[in-house]
Amino acid sequence: MSIHNQQTKLTIGLFGFGVVGESLYKVLAHTPSLNAQIKKVCIRHPHKKRNAPAELFTTDAALLLNDPEINVIVELIDDPVAAYYIVITALTGGKAVVSANKKLIAENMETLIGLQQQYNVPFLYEAACCASIPVIRNLEEYYDNDLLQGISGIVNGSTNYILTKVTEEKITFATALQQAQAEGFAESNPALDVNGIDAVNKLAILLTHAYGIIVSPSDLIHTGIQNLDENDARFATEKGFDIKLVAKACKQQDGTIAAFVLPQFVAKADQLSTVRNEYNGVVIESSLADKQFFYGKGAGGFPTASAVLSDLSALRYNYRYEYKKLNYQAPASLTTECYLKVCIRFRGILHVPQDRFDSILEWSCNRNHCHVTGILPLSQLTNSDWWKQPGISILLYPDGIFENYEPQRETSDQNLGFVEQLAEAE
Ligand code: HSE
């Protein structure tokens, strides 16, 4: 579809009337300047009470997808399989599509880019990463790959809400999760938030627009906050840090990118430390401009609807992603050739796999658990899931990524002391 000028009316077929869909409906009713109107809304449950006229609703997707008057499909459902069918059918039918479905987009990026090119249709999804923060369009348009040194983002509102409540109000992780669900921030399957899957889906999308990297999210190193507990929270407080779940992409000197989602200690002076509750924050580091900080609501009905609205508005001037960085002469690639300074908690001294560490800098143990701070090759997190097992938590230190690190393994006194202690315990 080509929407050539500001006069063209956007006639919208909306899929989903949940928190975001209903917010969009309300917002559009008060945005006449957009010249956009929802013609039909496709829903799954026809008997649920809706705050809109009954004649607006249908359960028949074909009614929207086959209507020649509808020139934009807005997809806001949380079923990625149904969403895939809707988006593919709409694009191949020549309709513009706006979606907030990060899982669908991250897992099918290559196909979706191909369809946009083949059918010459725009597919916009600013709401899929950090909701109200315009991060995708900025990475796409403003930051040249060569200048972009790194991205560090709190991109999942639910886990940030949970970490804030656990730290500040000293409530349990489970209670905080229930509150996040009640507020409507969490996914319908909250394990997607808690286990870092939502965050890694967003990181995969950001990597495409930042560096032209297309990667399956499941191939990126990631974990969430599922194994953190009050011992980690106490340890962080003692060190003067906050804990945040951070999605990171760091450019190395050879141009390769180290990328992962891990819980992280954040120093109080770091901008990410100011990001509380369901807010998101993204620090973009550029070689010339130093750091820029984007901050805003990363979840919830109106914040997400605001990004959808901005995409609809962009369609009015025929905006589409060009994916320019995919066509760079030397596209960036991912690397695991670097080292991390991490704190890992294990159930007890006998469970510490000290051979995974290059060196151990500090450790403390009691009868129940052991905190070990050490240097770990990033590649140690790719070859098995030992660090994700129940009872084990991992936290990256601030400035804890080293590219030019000299391995110490054979010489570290700290390691030797640790191994001796271990032998005694055995
Ligand atoms: N569950 C997501 C979050 C919603 O908590 O960030 C916004 O993508």
Image (cartoon, rainbow, N blue to C red):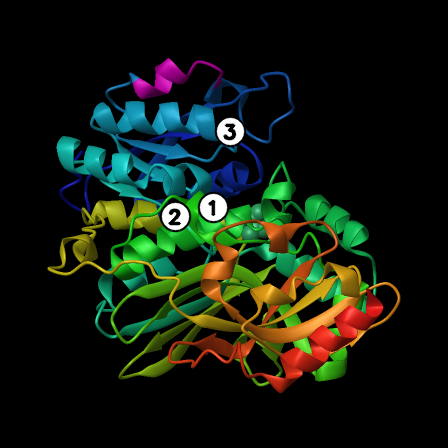
Q: Quadrant of the N terminus?
A: top left
Three-letter residue code for mark 2: Leu
Looking at the rendered structure, the secondary structure element under dot 3 is loop
Tell me what residue is drawn at x 69 percent, y 50 percent: 180
Q: Label 2: how many residues lie within 10 Å, few (<14), some (14-19) or many (20+)?
A: many
Whether disc 3's CB lies below 8 Å from ligand 1 is answered no
Q: Quadrant of the C terminus?
A: bottom right
Three-letter residue code for mark 3: Asp
Tell me what residue is drawn at x 45 percent, y 44 percent: 218
Q: Out of 317 and 233, give the one closest to the viewer.
A: 233
On the rendered structure, is 304 left or right of 215?
A: right
Quarter where residue 108 is shown: top left
Whole-percent x, y for residue 109 in the image: 31, 41
- Asked if one can make out residue 167 in the rendered structure from this viewpoint, the answer is no
Tell me what residue is drawn at x 60 percent, y 27 percent: 50
Give the extent of the magenta segment: 58-65
Closer to viewer: mark 3 or mark 2? 3
The label on residue 79 is 3
Q: Which residue is mark 2?
A: 309
Real-space Cα separation, disc 3 to disc 2, in angstroms: 21 Å
Real-space Cα separation, disc 1 to disc 2, in angstroms: 8 Å
Q: Do tag 1 and tag 2 residues touch (Cβ < 8 Å)? A: yes
Quarter where residue 395 is shown: bottom right
The label on residue 27 is 1
N-terminal label among 1 and 3: 1
- 111 relative to 327, above or below: above
- 399 relative to 73, above or below: below
The secondary structure that dominates the magenta segment is helix
